[in-house]
Amino acid sequence: QIHDLEKVFLDKIEEEIKIEPRDWMPDAYRKNLVRQISQHAHSEIVGMLPEGNWISRAPSLKRKAILIAKVQDEAGHGLYLYSAAETLGTSREETINDLHSGKAKYSSIFNYPTTSWADMGAIGWLVDGAAIINQVMLCRTSYGPYARAMVRICREESFHQRQGFEILLVLSRGTAEQKAMCQDAINRWWWPSLMMFGPRDGESTHSDQSMKWKIKRMSNDELRQKFIDMIAEQVKVLGMTLPDPDLKWNESRQHYDFGEIDWNEFWNVVKGNGPCNKQRIEARKNAWDEGAWVREAAAAYANKKKLKTNN
Ligand code: ACO
C-alpha cells in the first residue's frame, strides 16, 4: 500500500502538482523539508541582528525608516517560514529550541559583523541579492506552503536589494572617504555572500535527493554562477571592483570565471566558530527569554476568551 501512495506522490512531483500538508509524503521528504525550511526561517530571524545594529545610527531619518521597514520584513519572512514548517507537523517551540541549542543551522552569512554604514548597502545588494537568486527557484519548489511563502518573500527581497544598491550608489558618488567605505564593504561581504549558496555540488549532502524531489530546482554551483554573472556586471555601475583577481569573463563558457572560495572559512563558520556566532545565538536566547511574559499574557488571554465562549 505504501508503494501505491509513493507512486501517487512521485507522479505529482513528475507532473509539477504541489504536495500539500495533508497529502501522503515519504518520511525523508518531510524531514528534509523541515530541515531546510526551519533553517531558512532561522536565517531570516538571525539576519535581523546585523542590520538591527545600525537602526539607531542610520545617517538620516529617511534611511532609518527604510531600514526599520526592511528589518521588519525579515521578521515577517521568518514567521511565514516557521508557519510553513508547522504544516509539516513540527511545533514552533521545537524548531526554536533547535536554534538555541545549536542543533539547527542558519545561514553562515549572518555571523559576520557590520562595522560601517556601507555594510547596510552591501548586505542589501549582495546578501539579499544572493537570497533572491536562491529563492526565485524556490517559488517552484514542490511543497505548496513553502512555494507560496516564497512568492511574497521574493517581492520584498527585490525591494531590499534595490535599497542596498542605492545606498552604495550614493556612497560611490560621494567623497573619497565614502568611496573607500563602499569598496571596503564590498571587499568584506563578497566572499561570504558566495558561501551562502552552500558547498560545491560534489560536497552537497542533500542536493541529489532534493533535486529528485524538486525541493531544489537548481544546484548550489549553478546558482552561485548565476549570482556572480549578475554582480560582476552591476559592480561596474558603482565604479567599484570585486576582490577577486581571477574574476574574468569566459567567452567560451559565456560565464565569469572566478577564484577559489576559502572552504575552510566556510565550514569553520558553519560549525559555530565565525566572528559573531556566539553573539548571535546569545541575542536570540535573550530575546526569547525577555519575550516570555508576552507569550504568557497571550496564552492567559486566549484561555480567558475560551472560558467566556464556553459559558
Ligand atoms: N550556511 C550555513 N549552513 C549551510 C550553508 C550556509 N551558507 N550552506 C549549506 N549549509 C549546510 C546545510 O544546511 C547542510 O547542513 P545540514 O545537513 O546540517 O542541514 C550542509 O551545509 C550541506 O549543504 P547542502 O547539502 O548543500 O544543503 P542544502 O541542500 O540544504 O543546500 C541551501 C543549502 C542552498 C542553503 C538550501 O538549504 C536552501 O536553498 N535553503 C533555503 C534558502 C535559505 O536558507 N537562505 C538563507 C539565507 S537568505 C536570507 O535569510 C535573507
Image: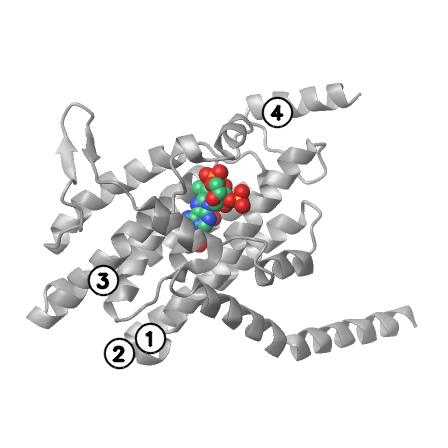
Residue 60's label in the rendered image is: 2
Q: Nearer the viewer, mark 3 or mark 4?
A: 3
Query: Residue 210: where, in percent of width, then height?
Result: 53, 32
Q: Nearer the viewer, mark 3 or mark 1?
A: 3
Q: Label 2 CB, ligand 1: below 8 Å? A: no
Give the SS element for disc 2. loop
Question: Seen in the image, is 158 located left or right of residue 11?
Answer: left
**Which residue in the structure is indicated by mark 1?**
64
Whether pointer 1 and pointer 2 mark residues with C-beta atoms closer than 8 Å, the reply is yes
Give the SS element for disc 3. helix
Q: Residue at the spot x=12%, y=66% of the render?
A: 180
Counting residues from the start of the chain, the first of labels 1 and 4 encountered is 4
- Residue 185, above or below 30: below
**Which residue in the structure is indicated by mark 4?**
12
Q: Amino acid at mark 3?
A: Ala
Q: Nearer the viewer, mark 2 or mark 3?
A: 3
Which residue is situated farthest in the right direction here?
A: 311
How far apart, in angstroms, are the residues tagged by discs 1 and 2?
Answer: 6 Å
Q: Amino acid at mark 2?
A: Ser
Counting residues from the start of the chain, the first of labels 4 and 2 encountered is 4
Q: Nearer the viewer, residue 91 or 268?
A: 268
Give the SS element for disc 1. helix
